Amino acid sequence: MDAKSVDPEKAAAGDVCDADCVMPVRSANPIRARSLIRDNLEKQAGCLNLIHSRMPNIKVFSGTSHPDLAQRIVDRLGIDLGKVVTKKFSNLETCVEIGESVRGEDVYIVQSGSGEINDNLMELLIMINACKIASASRVTAVIPCFPYARQDKKDKLAGSDDTEEAKKLAKKNYDWKFRSRAPISAKLVANMLSVAGADHIITMDLHASQIQGFFDIPVDNLYAEPAVLKWIKENIPEWKNSIIVSPDAGGAKRVTSIADRLNVEFALIHKERKKANEVASMVLVGDVKDKIAILVDDMADTCGTIVHAADRLVEAGATKVYAILTHGIFSGPAISRINNACFEAVVVTNTIPQDGHMRDCPKIQCIDVSMMFAEAVRRTHNGESVSYLFSNVPY
């Protein structure tokens, strides 16, 4: 028998392992996110590096708001960022050019609601529309921090049961939260994304989970909670003697969930606002004496709330105070307030770029959540469930 001839009996018995002459066969199990040829070569030859793995029929593009997060996502997926050029005309109109074919592709566009929010939102809408009219099979907007999420409802004007002083204050105050004609801008953004051509939304820790109901397309609202739990256990040695605190009543559900999973107690701070970004009074509900207080909230803007809350916790006897936030916006006097406050650390995720904030304030630490978005993209592309990510951190 010459070197190239094959004994039929041995071939039937599966004793021939020459990778060069093995043809791929249809598998009973669907093979996703990697080629069929690679799968057969791995099984029969055990050569993991013979063919470079990639996810077929997927393109990930990045807007200008958070290119670092987009790069981390594609690095986790083992693919390259799609080519896109964004520029502005002399009259500041946004222009987007998609630099490669997206026909029949599963497209993901990463753009966070940070920085120049209006420009970034318009850029996202234009990118979605550009991909859609270029015959992309599906366009998913990956929006780590959803813009205009705080404008999710109309707040009533002073009612008949309020005091005369409260009525006068409400009439004098021109802040949107006290006006019956306030817009529901989060709903408007949802409509704009749908009309632009988005087929699916992936975001994280919406300010109000009901915003998902503003859409008529699927919305996956990921949670930073698993990453927060992991950070607490790895970075606070005395975490078993901690108490989880919500700086407002709206975050009660969030902190009770974390407290239950850590098997510790929780507390609540009720705040009253006179106008936006100004807190009038705070009432602590719960016992924090001789405990490590961990403030947990979905976002911090000017940081007036969490700084006042930290002072209130120290007055009540807390030994240390940490703040853990999903979206660290840190506008206006936020950085100086944190520097002058009594925090051990202010921990945020990288749904918003934090490099500049971390340089200006050594107390700020960052949790990388790119692996959660990468896994959500992979599972969505493969048609798998993403509910695993609601309670676990992928590694």
Image (cartoon, helix red, strand yellow):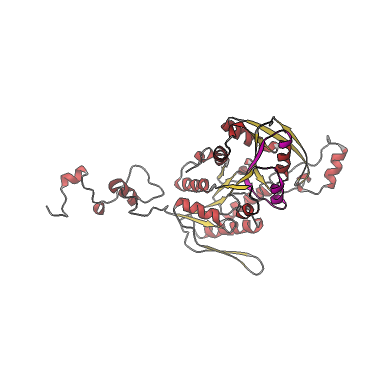
Kindly indicate the quadrant of the structure image that contains residue 275.
top right
Question: In the displayed image of the protein, which residue is found farthest to the right?
Answer: 164
In the picture, measured across the screen, residue 379 lies left or right of residue 18, that is right
Residue 330 on the magenta span: yes
Q: Number of labelled discs?
A: 0
Residue 186 visible in the shown view: yes
Asked if the stretch drawn in magenta spans residue 141, the answer is no
Position in image of residue 26 (x %, y %): 31, 47
In this view, the residue in front, 270 or 356, is 356
Where does the image place residue 146, in percent across and percent down from the top left? 62, 49
The x, y position of residue 50, in whole percent, is 32, 54
Q: Quadrant of residue 158?
A: top right
Give the vertical position of 343 relative to 18 (above or below): above
Which sits in the foreground, 187 or 344?
344
Point 61% across, 51% down: residue: 352
> Height in image: 280 above or below 22?
above
Q: Determine if residue 138 is in view.
A: no
Magenta segment boundaries in residue numbering: 314-343
Residue at point 64%, 56% (across, down): 115
**154, 260: nearer the viewer:** 260
Q: Where is residue 374 in the image (x, y as percent from the top left)?
A: 50, 48
Q: Horizontal placement of 7 versus 19: left or right?
A: left
Tell me which residue sits at (56%, 48%) in the image. Answer: 201
